[in-house]
Image: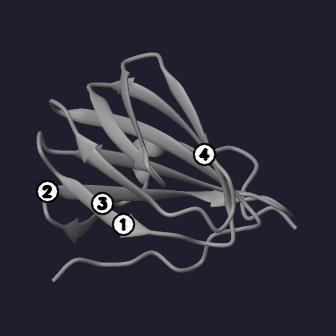
């Protein structure tokens, strides 16, 4: 069941998860969830993995994405896929804004101290 059919981002509270990262949970459908990120330059989402397939789109700024032994540099307008159970890390390059889509629905959002 869909949480909401229409999402108005300005009405969703931004959650400070620490380390210069703000997250907005845009909602979930039956099989996927969507998160919106604002990250300060140099912010890091450290090495992690999850059972979810992940698709992301860089709206503004960019990332250095480390996946396994590979390193990728993405900029505004670029997109990425992260397969399930794959170690990966993000480093924001510039003030960065991005969207992530997860399948199945992502429920475990780690918080920084």
Asked if the residue at tag 1 contacts the one at tag 4, i.e. Cβ–Cβ closer than 8 Å, the answer is no
Vertical placement of residue 113 versus 14, above or below: below
The disc at residue 45 is: 3
Q: Quadrant of the N terminus?
A: bottom right
Q: Quick one: SS at disc 2? A: loop
Asked if the residue at tag 3 contacts the one at tag 1, i.e. Cβ–Cβ closer than 8 Å, the answer is no
The disc at residue 7 is: 4
Q: Which residue: 48% across, 55% down?
A: 68
Q: Which residue: 54% across, 27% down?
A: 79
Circle nearer the N terminus (2, 4)? 4
Q: Which residue is mark 1?
A: 47
Asked if the residue at tag 4 contacts the one at tag 2, i.e. Cβ–Cβ closer than 8 Å, the answer is no
User: Label 2, label 4: how many angstroms apart (C-alpha)?
Assistant: 24 Å
Q: Which residue is mark 2?
A: 20
Q: Nearer the viewer, mark 1 or mark 2?
A: 1
Q: Quick one: SS at disc 3? A: strand
User: For the residue carrying disc 4, how many other residues have a C-alpha within 10 Å: few (<14), some (14-19), or many (20+)?
Assistant: few
Circle nearer the N terminus (3, 4)? 4
Q: Which residue: 35% across, 58% down?
A: 23
User: Label 3, label 4: how many angstroms apart (C-alpha)?
Assistant: 25 Å
Q: Which residue: 46% across, 16% down?
A: 77
Left or right of 10 in this view: 40:
left
Residue 103, image quadrant: bottom right
Circle nearer the N terminus (1, 2)? 2
User: Label 1, label 3: how many angstroms apart (C-alpha)?
Assistant: 7 Å
Q: Quadrant of the C terminus?
A: bottom left
Query: In terms of depth relative to the viewer, which is nearer, 86 or 112?
Result: 86
Vertical placement of residue 59 versus 28, above or below: above
């Amino acid at each position: 069941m869909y949480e909401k059919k229409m999402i108005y981002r300005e009405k969703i509270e931004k959650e400070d998860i620490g380390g210069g990262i703000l997250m907005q949970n845009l909602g979930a459908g039956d099989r996927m969830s969507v998160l919106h990120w604002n990250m300060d330059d140099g912010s890091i989402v450290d090495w992690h993995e999850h059972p979810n397939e992940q698709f992301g789109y860089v709206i503004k700024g960019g990332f250095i994405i480390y996946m396994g032994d590979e390193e990728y540099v993405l900029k505004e307008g670029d997109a990425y896929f992260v397969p399930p159970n794959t170690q990966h890390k993000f480093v924001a390059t510039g003030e960065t804004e991005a969207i992530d889509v997860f399948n199945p629905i992502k429920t475990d959002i780690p918080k920084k101290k």
